Image: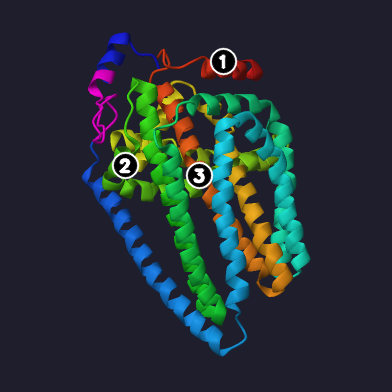
């Protein structure tokens, strides 16, 4: 997307260093002010999120108390054998996640290579652990883990030529982290530690009695946990992406604490919507790309089905993608409109192929899998030694906690990359950007030819 120097200066002049949410009309098609329907949807999701959080908290407290009372009157449940491995795994998740985000920041190239080569090994190790446990559920989980590990290793071989660019884009986008980023990450991890430990106590209380209704309670707690962890991650994502965008686009630095205050005050509804939509659409799009690779073009029927599913996924990604969080933070847009605007902008400047080939998102995902696997191995091995019957569930819970803890710790770096892409797409001619993206686009064009 090309713009004149005068237009660019006018847009930059419209932006302000104020800590208020920036509302700038850049394109005639962008509606900065949310519609009445959009405002109601944001408010509705915000209310739903806090209501479910309150209700699930009450449920967790009740289940915990009931579980401890039940454990005191029967030998069916042993809190001293169920809680310590899981709580230690939770603490390990926080420590490993913080260390890993620091390693990624200081040595991105080595971190990327390490994740792509060691995550398959860790995933297979979790699979072997579950097979050793020997229960029907653990055998199924172990088989899935080993197959996933093999697929991850094949994928790493396929994309190893992209490691250098992923390292460069991660380096250039995180070269000047926002002030107090480390403190912000630590507070986020501590919040997750407390919330995860709290959720674990409720799951343990439901496990104590183990009725059919308790299984429903566990599923409800897990669903609430997944959504809440996504919201925590994306609150951090929106805050940091706004700060980095303003720096990349205008050279303006915004106070981290003030930016987070704005996010909490104005944008929770949009973040809740995005946190519910993005994982689902991301899964659909990822499966569509995998099906395309498997189908190829030899079988006409399979190719047509894969092409139809891929078109459906491509339509969905327009209205729900993580780059939309940048415009949510900067312009106070609703999430769906922000996603549509950023994706349309990527199309105009022909960045879609570059976005699709970028490995930073995959790197963050595999990092989460690696940390989750470590936590699953810690908790599962401990339980395998002291109480084999708890090993499968504890390992799975520990994996989920470790995965999300790492994703939250890396959120500021992924947000910085997204902000870099979005700000570049708005003004590719800006002198604030180096040749990282143009050189990569030229390479992609040569490969396509």
Distance (Cα) linking label 2 and label 1: 33 Å
Q: Is residue 312 magenta?
A: no
Q: Nearer the viewer, mark 1 or mark 3?
A: 3
- Precedes in sequence: disc 2 or disc 1: 2
Q: Residue at x 64, y 34 (%)?
A: 112
Distance (Cα) linking label 1 and label 3: 30 Å
- In magenta, the rendered stretch is 12-32
Element marked by disc 3:
helix
Picture coordinates of residue 84, whole percent (x, y):
59, 68
The label on residue 334 is: 2
Q: Nearer the viewer, residue 333 or 173?
A: 173
Which residue is disc 1 drawn over?
439
The label on residue 409 is: 3
Q: Nearer the viewer, residue 354 or 9?
A: 9
Q: Within 10 Å of the Cα at label 1, are there few (<14), some (14-19), or many (20+) other Cα atoms?
A: few
Element marked by disc 1:
helix
Q: Nearer the viewer, mark 2 or mark 1?
A: 1
Q: Residue at x 52, y 46 (%)?
A: 407
């Amino acid at each position: 997307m090309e713009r004149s120097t005068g237009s660019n200066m006018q847009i930059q002049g419209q932006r302000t260093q104020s800590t208020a949410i920036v509302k700038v009309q850049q394109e005639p098609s962008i509606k900065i002010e949310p519609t009445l329907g959009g405002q109601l949807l944001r408010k509705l999701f915000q209310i739903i999120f806090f209501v479910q959080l309150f209700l699930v908290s009450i449920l967790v407290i009740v289940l915990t108390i009931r579980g401890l009372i039940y454990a005191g009157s029967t030998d069916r449940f042993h809190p001293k054998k169920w809680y310590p491995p899981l709580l230690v795994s939770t603490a390990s998740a926080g420590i490993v996640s913080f260390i890993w985000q620091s390693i990624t920041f200081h040595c991105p190239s080595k971190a990327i290579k390490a994740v792509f080569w060691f995550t398959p090994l860790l995933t297979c190790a979790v699979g072997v652990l579950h097979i050793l446990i020997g229960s029907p559920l653990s055998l199924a989980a172990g088989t899935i883990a080993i197959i996933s590990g093999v697929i991850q290793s094949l994928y790493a071989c396929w994309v190893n030529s992209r490691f250098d660019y992923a390292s460069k884009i991660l380096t250039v986008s995180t070269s000047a982290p926002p002030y107090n980023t480390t403190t912000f990450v630590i507070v986020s991890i501590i919040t997750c530690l407390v919330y995860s430990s709290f959720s674990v106590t409720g799951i343990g209380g439901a496990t104590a009695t183990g009725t059919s209704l308790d299984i429903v309670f566990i599923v409800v707690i897990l669903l609430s946990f997944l959504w809440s962890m996504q919201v925590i991650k994306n609150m951090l994502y929106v805050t940091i992406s706004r700060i980095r965008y303003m720096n990349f686009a205008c050279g303006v630095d915004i106070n981290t604490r003030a930016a987070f205050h704005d996010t909490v005050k104005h944008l929770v509804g949009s973040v809740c919507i995005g946190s519910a939509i993005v994982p689902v659409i991301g899964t659909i799009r990822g499966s569509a790309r995998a099906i395309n690779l498997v189908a190829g073009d030899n079988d006409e029927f399979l190719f047509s089905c894969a092409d139809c599913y891929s078109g459906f996924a491509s339509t969905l990604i327009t209205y729900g993608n993580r780059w939309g969080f940048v415009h949510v933070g900067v312009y106070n847009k609703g999430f769906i409109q922000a996603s549509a605007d950023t994706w349309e902008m990527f199309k105009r400047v022909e960045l879609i192929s570059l976005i699709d080939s970028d490995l930073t998102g995959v790197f963050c995902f595999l990092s989460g899998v690696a940390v989750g696997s470590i936590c699953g191995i810690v908790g599962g091995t401990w339980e395998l030694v002291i109480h084999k019957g708890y090993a499968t569930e504890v390992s799975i819970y520990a994996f989920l906690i470790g995965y999300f803890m790492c994703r939250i710790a890396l959120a500021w770096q992924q947000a910085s990359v997204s902000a870099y892409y979005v700000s570049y797409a708005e003004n590719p001619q800006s002198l604030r950007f180096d040749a990282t993206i143009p050189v990569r686009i030229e390479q992609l064009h040569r490969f396509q030819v």
